[in-house]
């Protein structure tokens, strides 16, 4: 039957996956309803993820660069940090983007329905909003419900000194001593912000390296730098207990040798991963399968087991990244509109916007070794880059992996300032099937950090002449 409202395509969730899908479907002529439980559109990415973190990381970068200019003969006074104004800057950036989304929805006649949506059948969603409950019926649906931070069972709830990434981005205060639980991308980005703002940071990571997933050699320059700046970086160590005391958070650590030790912190960020929201939408009532972790399995057209229901973004699996959600959103919307599309990206780049940045795409050496994939590599150390030296930041490295059969680029890892921007060239090279000669013969402007890709290809070919 028909609901209170009806749409040809209903999109559940307005994060980067959801709004992209909604806009694309509307552009292709569909009548679209976008359901969102939060007052503001944009999901995690715009409100409490990518964007606010990058606004704060920019502030952090300027502070640390100014500090380090002393080594180049220019000294600035100690920065005066007005936390309210820093927060206002971040909120303004977020507001510009989320406000933009409202305008874009109106321009496309995408109807936004506010409230928590749950399936009641294969063609119906019930939305519980502030002004009561509405039913929305649909011909096709795209689930873009995203994910949320996970906690650990022994961590006290409701202590304002213990935050997840959302709480850390609120930037309520700068603690004296802060523990970052989890040495992954989100934890290290927030560590970078709080370090620059004056907190003494300890990072604890269960694995034997920070940013597990990236090659060890690529992570090393970051590990070295934070090793020098932070109070402690504990690897192969887990937190086994947290006790909220008046004077601070008493944390018990357990190292790989089984020995335990304790320390007390003023604030703690829990960044141990994210859980998909698949279990919160009564998907089973629509016949859509949700696995035990909360992910919704989909095929290459983003279709769930139910032919007219699609799913995209964090809720369908790793990597949980905005640009992956966006790409999947376009695929799902175009398939809804009858186009013959599928998700066939060769790679999804990953970037840690730490200082220095760590970026990789395609095959990593770790993955190649684990899967027994043959590769050869070209590595260019930034200590030989004129631009990196001029920036006073020569600790970087550019590494390209090649298929030994045809010399095509199959993977790239970059660490150093701006690595996140530099990885785009490697991504294009891999997508287009470029080989070492293509990268080596493309004239890159001198002196730039982008030259390091050119040099890495030449290192592989053995044709490099002048490293500077
Ligand atoms: P989400 O952005 O999670 O959006 C889902 C939306 O659906 C939310 O608005 C939610 O309120 C709504 N919703 C869920 N269930 C319902 C329901 N039942 N009814 C109504 N509405 C519902 N990724 C990057 O690529 N680059 C980065 O730099 C980056 N930085 C990050 C930094 C932090 C601190 C965090 C936490 C994440 C970061 N990410 C980054 C990850 C990125 O934010 C996510 O991958 C991305 O937001 C996923 O988009 P999505 O559309 O799948 O879902």
Image (cartoon, helix red, strand yellow):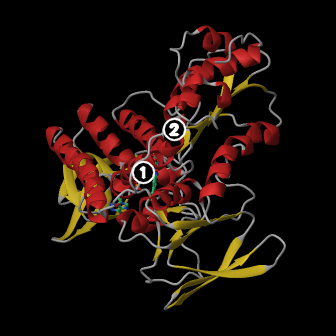
Residue nearest the observer in this picture, 295 or 314 = 314
Q: Would you say the residues marked 1 and 2 are in contact, meaning their CB atoms lie under 8 Å apart?
A: no
Disc 2: residue Cβ within 8 A of ligand 1's nearest atom: no
In the rendered view, would you say 23 is above or below 250?
A: above
Most foreground residue, 125 or 169: 169
Check the image and name the residue furthest to the front: 73
Spatial CA distance of label 1 from label 2 is 15 Å
In this rendering, is residue 329 above or below 373? below
Mark 1: is the Cβ under 8 angstroms from ligand 1? no
111 sits left or right of 241 in the view: left
User: Residue 144 placed where, x, y %?
Assistant: 40, 52
In the rendered image, which quarter is residue 49 located in? bottom left
Image coordinates for residue 164, horizontal then vertical, percent: 47, 68
SS category of the residue bearing label 2:
helix
Q: Using a 10 Å C-alpha cutoff, classify the residue at mark 1 as few (fewer than 14 neighbours), some (14 to 19) or many (20 or more).
A: some
Q: Is residue 438 left or right of residue 90?
A: right
Kindly tell me whether residue 306 is visible in this rendering. Answer: no
Q: Nearer the viewer, mark 1 or mark 2?
A: 2
Residue 464 in percent (x, y) is at: 72, 12
* Figure check: 96 above or below 455: below
The residue depicted at 71 percent of the width and 10 percent of the height is 465
Q: Nearer the viewer, residue 17 or 453?
A: 453
Quadrant into which the C terminus falls: top right
Name the residue: 80% across, 39% down: 371
Q: Secondary structure at mark 1?
A: helix
Q: Where residue 129 appears, x then y in whole percent?
A: 22, 69
Quadrant of the image where one finds ligand 1? bottom left
- Which disc is residue 72 wearing? 2
Which residue shows up at 67% across the image and 45% down it? Answer: 219
What's the mark number on residue 63? 1
Quarter occupied by the N terminus: bottom left
């Amino acid at each position: 039957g028909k609901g209170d409202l009806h749409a040809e395509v209903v999109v559940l969730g307005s994060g980067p996956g959801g709004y992209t899908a909604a806009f694309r479907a509307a552009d292709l002529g569909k009548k679209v309803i976008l359901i969102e439980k939060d007052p503001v559109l944009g999901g995690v990415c715009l409100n409490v993820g990518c964007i606010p973190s990058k606004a704060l990381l920019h502030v952090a970068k300027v502070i640390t660069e100014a500090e380090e200019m002393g080594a180049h003969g220019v000294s600035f006074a100690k920065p005066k940090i007005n936390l309210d104004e820093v927060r206002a800057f971040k909120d303004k950036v977020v507001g510009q983007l989320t406000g933009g989304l409202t305008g874009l929805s109106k321009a496309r006649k995408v109807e936004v329905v506010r409230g928590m949506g749950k399936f009641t059948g294969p063609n119906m969603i019930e939305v519980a909003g502030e002004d009561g409950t509405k039913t929305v019926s649909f011909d096709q649906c795209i689930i873009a419900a995203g994910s949320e931070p996970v906690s650990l069972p022994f961590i006290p709830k409701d202590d304002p000194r213990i935050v997840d990434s959302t709480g850390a981005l609120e930037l309520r205060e700068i603690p004296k001593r802060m523990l970052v639980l989890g040495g992954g991308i989100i934890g290290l980005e927030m560590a970078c912000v709080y370090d620059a703002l004056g907190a003494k940071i300890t990072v604890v990571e269960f694995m034997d390296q920070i940013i597990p997933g990236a090659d060890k050699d690529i992570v090393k320059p970051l590990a070295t730098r934070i090793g020098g700046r932070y109070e402690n970086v504990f690897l192969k160590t887990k937190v086994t207990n947290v006790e909220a005391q008046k004077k601070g958070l008493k944390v018990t650590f357990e190292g790989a040798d089984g020995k335990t030790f304790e320390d007390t912190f003023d604030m703690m960020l829990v960044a141990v991963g994210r859980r998909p929201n698949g279990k919160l939408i009564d998907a089973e009532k629509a016949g859509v399968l949700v696995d035990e972790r909360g992910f919704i399995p989909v095929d290459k057209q983003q279709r769930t087991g139910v032919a007219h229901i699609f799913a995209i973004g964090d809720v369908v699996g790793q990597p949980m990244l905005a640009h992956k959600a966006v790409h999947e959103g376009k695929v799902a919307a175009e398939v809804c509109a009858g186009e013959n599309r599928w998700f066939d990206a060769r790679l999804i780049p990953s970037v840690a916007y730490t200082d220095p940045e760590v970026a990789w795409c395609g095959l990593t050496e770790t993955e190649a070794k684990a899967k027994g994939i043959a590769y050869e590599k070209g590595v260019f150390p930034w200590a030989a880059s004129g631009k990196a030296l001029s920036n006073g930041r020569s600790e970087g490295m550019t590494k390209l992996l090649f298929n030994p059969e045809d010399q095509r680029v199959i993977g790239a890892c970059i660490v150093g300032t701006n690595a996140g921007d530099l990885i785009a060239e490697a991504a294009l090279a891999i997508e287009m099937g470029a080989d070492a000669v293509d990268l080596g013969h493309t004239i890159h402007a001198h002196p730039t950090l982008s030259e390091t890709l050119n040099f890495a290809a030449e290192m592989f070919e053995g044709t490099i002449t002048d490293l500077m």
